[in-house]
Amino acid sequence: MMLRVSLKTLLVHGFKAGWRRLSKFGAVMSRTRWRGLCLSRLFLLGFLATALSGQPLLRAQIVPPHAVQALSAAHQDLQAGMILYKAQRYVEAIDRWERSAEAFTLQGEIIGQAISLNNLSLSYQQIGQWEIATDLIEQCLDILSRQELAEPLAGLDETLAKALNTKGELLWNQGHSEEALAYWRQAAQRYAEANYYPGVAIAQINQAKALQSLGLSTQAVELLSSVGRTLLQETEVDLQAVGFKSLGQTLRKIGETEASQEVLRQGIAISPNPAITSEILLELGNTAQDLRIQALAIGKEQEGQALAMQSLQHYREAAQLAVSPQLQAQAQINQLWLLILTQRWSEAETLWPGVLKAVSDLTPSRASVYARLNLARSLTCLRTSSGQLASGCLESSQTVIPEAFAVVNAPSMAAISQLVATAVNHSRQLQDRLAESFAIGQLGNLYAQNNQYSEALELTYQAIAIAEDENAPESAFLWQRQLGKLLKRQGDLQGAIAAYSQTVNSLESIRQNLLLIDSEAQFSFRENAEPIYREFVDLLLLSQPKESDLRRAISSIDSLQRTELENFLRCDLSQLFRIDETTVDQAAAKIYPIILPSRLAVILEVPGKPLEYREVPVSQKDIEATLTALRSELTEPGRTPEVLVHASQVYQWLIAPIETILEENPQIQTLVFVPDGALRNIPLGVLYDGERYFIEKGYAIAIAPRLELFNPAISAEKLSILAGGIELPQTIEQIQFPQIEEVDAELSAIPSQLLVSAPLLNEEFTLSNLEKQLGTGQFSAIHWKTHGIFSSDPTETYLVAYQDTIRANNLNQLVQQARQIRSAPLELMILSACNTAQGDNRAVLGLAGLAVRAGARSTLSTLWRADDSANTRLMTNFYQALTQGSTKAQALQQAQVRLLAEGYTAPHYWATYVLVGNWL
């Protein structure tokens, strides 16, 4: 801990010393007459900031040789600082730019002074000194604004554009998206006035990033579509190629991965040299990896394998063409990690010695510190036995293939330790505290693996302290979790719970930054966040949990559910209303089943009473296998005997432990499940006690993936329904959609008093007609019978219109338009003849996400395609019950029981519908 204080003192002293030197510039400026200075474009723009990090790019090719030789000492310091900045040696770059800023100020060279101040602001941003960075960029903008009023100078527009871009970057990094957008718009205008098109493109890319974060995704995509046209106006091919790389990178980070691939391929096609080509290939590899992660998340194993091969090939080519040792090493590290994730052990064994040599030769920089740490992680996985591998070296959806794990030439622990120790030393040499936190935390992990727990604890505490000093939750949460594991191992359960509580708090603080910035980070965050929430809940529910522990467990699972929904929707749900005691339905009990590694935990909440807790010893693997089998059997009418076996097993796990409590509370009429994991894909009314289905026991059933999103209130107004659907067979985008029977019959079952206009059928069921009808504001509900797919991937969630698809964002726009006119949300959205995506354990998330995105209080939909005549009978019964005063959940329960009594005894027919959201 003394080392931490010493380094902090040193850093503060260094910043103060630099600030004293900068203070002299202001005094000199007040005595200096402004003079115009025509700097070469090498320093006029200084560098081209990329869309994401403010990293400079040199336009050296336009500087004539004699001009380079004639550069003054100030210019040389400016150029040297740029080289150091690109090498991520920010403290050394600061020293150079402080000198150039002071010299340019003394000489009265306004452009050089402004560029130096701008670059200093970028460097201080990189090391997290926001206050100093803000003061510097404000000085820069003030100088340029005053000069513009006095007399124009060559290069003033480009320099001012660069400064405005940097100010926007500063505001963005501090979470001020709207203010950043305003500055980036000004930057684009200034770049355009200077006819510098790569700068215009970069400012537009940044604007799109801000628009996306503000929820204006349509505007963001429209703006990005114009960036390519802007870049084509640039005559310098290398700048075009670099611009396409930045555009492709941004598209990937906001989730437009297919568009990212196309743009990056354009960049490859025009790239004039191997250096730029290798950078673009590295990005292509990252995009393919992003697509692979998304494919695996929704169960597309074969597609994921193909994308892994693409990504590996791109990484290999990037490494072969790389001019920069850093980029070559990064491509090889990415390649090695992907080989490990895909369990290609022999290739990983062949590759790692060369990667170790390349990384060991890298000079100190932030990038080289992280390269060492990432390589150390990979090498640690190659030393781990197959039985332990899944804990950190594979994605959570994967299982280890023991026969494939045969690493003979494993790296030594000494080599791995040396990598991490060097990373620690280099981070301190660079005075990069954030990198130091990562390095020290990873060193603690190595000590823990070597069973040196006291040393591991000390290093973990140090890593947390540095991360907290730097306000860096993206580092803190890793080491807080590590601390929780270490304390649990030592038997300190309360200490472990406290550490995990801090971990969850850190996750909450970084969650919003990932929502709309980096789609790969979103999927990766889900992979990392879910185990943390579950580990925390597992600790809370050990040994007779108290009421407060149960509340915290519910809150943690609720936070996980919110994270999943926000990742689906790419928006922040924290501002939505919460349910309080005045809106709670006193006749509804809430059931929280939580799947843990070795048991199923069930928390029951009866209004006005203490929480009840039960647990059943059963492995997560057995639960998921049973639920997967049950879900598959339900889709086939002839497999009812198998359904009964598995439905009975799940009943014993989930319902039997709390059945007595439910019987003791006869006022309970509705059960609201907040299902976990694969339970979300099961219609819970199908559970079987050996004699009756659960739906026959008189309880209405609803699903609320996150309770606070669906206000349980009865609407005072009568439903007014916009009905429609398609029965015709269609082929759209090479996908065949078969004919749907009895569309007209089902829609005719809607009571006439609930219909405002005639249903939109077949050719009339188009986006434009739906938009026109909803735009009248007459409708409080929709009932559409059409094909559709629900997936946890928003790009794979859609409904089918006539010769078109209605994507999740299209439906959002349609319904939001109606909501604005009505000043009220949709009360009910019924989607018949839809399916959930096969192999996607989070598919119902797509249904819930669709409901939240559309602003619908309740959504009633099918989980699989069942018999059309059965669906029609069920909907007829549903509307009859609804118009007689039943709640939505009660109407569905009564309709299902009645269908069962009418001879549709197979659950395949009557259990296909689920109600998500408001059950009243």
Image: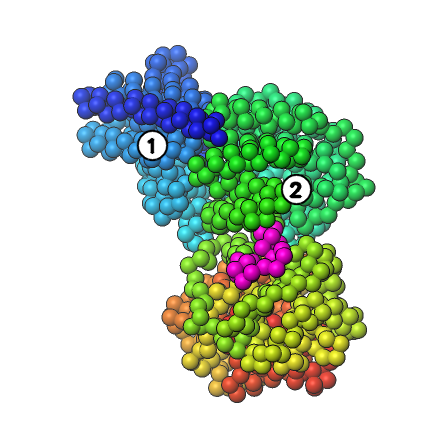
Residue 410 position, x and y percent, is 74, 29
Q: Residue at x 44, y 25 (%)?
A: 6
Residue 254 position, x and y percent, is 50, 47
Q: Amino acid at mark 2?
A: Gly
Looking at this rendering, what residue extends furthest in the bottom direction? 884
Q: Would residue 887 appear left or right of 833 to someone viewing this image? A: left
Check if residue 543 falls in the magenta segment: yes
Up-down: is 606 above or below 558?
Answer: below
- Kindly identify which residue carries mark 2: 392
Mark 2 nearby-residue class (10 Å; few <14, some 14–19, many ≥20): some
Q: Answer yes or no: do the residues labelled 1 and 2 have beta carbons within 8 Å?
A: no
Question: Which element is circle 2 on?
Answer: loop
Q: Residue 842: tell me if it is visible.
A: no
Display coloring: rainbow
Q: Amino acid at mark 1?
A: Ile
Q: Quadrant of residue 554?
A: bottom right
Check if residue 529 falls in the magenta segment: no
Point out the stretch of residues depicted in magenta.
534-554
Question: Which element is circle 1 on?
Answer: helix
Residue 654 position, x and y percent, is 67, 68
Q: Residue at x 45, y 39 (%)?
A: 468
Looking at this rendering, what residue extends furthest in the right direction? 403
- Kindly identify which residue carries mark 1: 132
The rendered magenta stretch, by its main secondary structure, is classed as helix
Q: Residue 535: tell me if it is visible.
A: yes
Distance (Cα) linking label 1 and label 2: 39 Å
Q: Residue at x 43, y 54 (%)?
A: 215
Residue 615 position, x and y percent, is 66, 63
Q: Nearer the viewer, mark 1 or mark 2?
A: 2
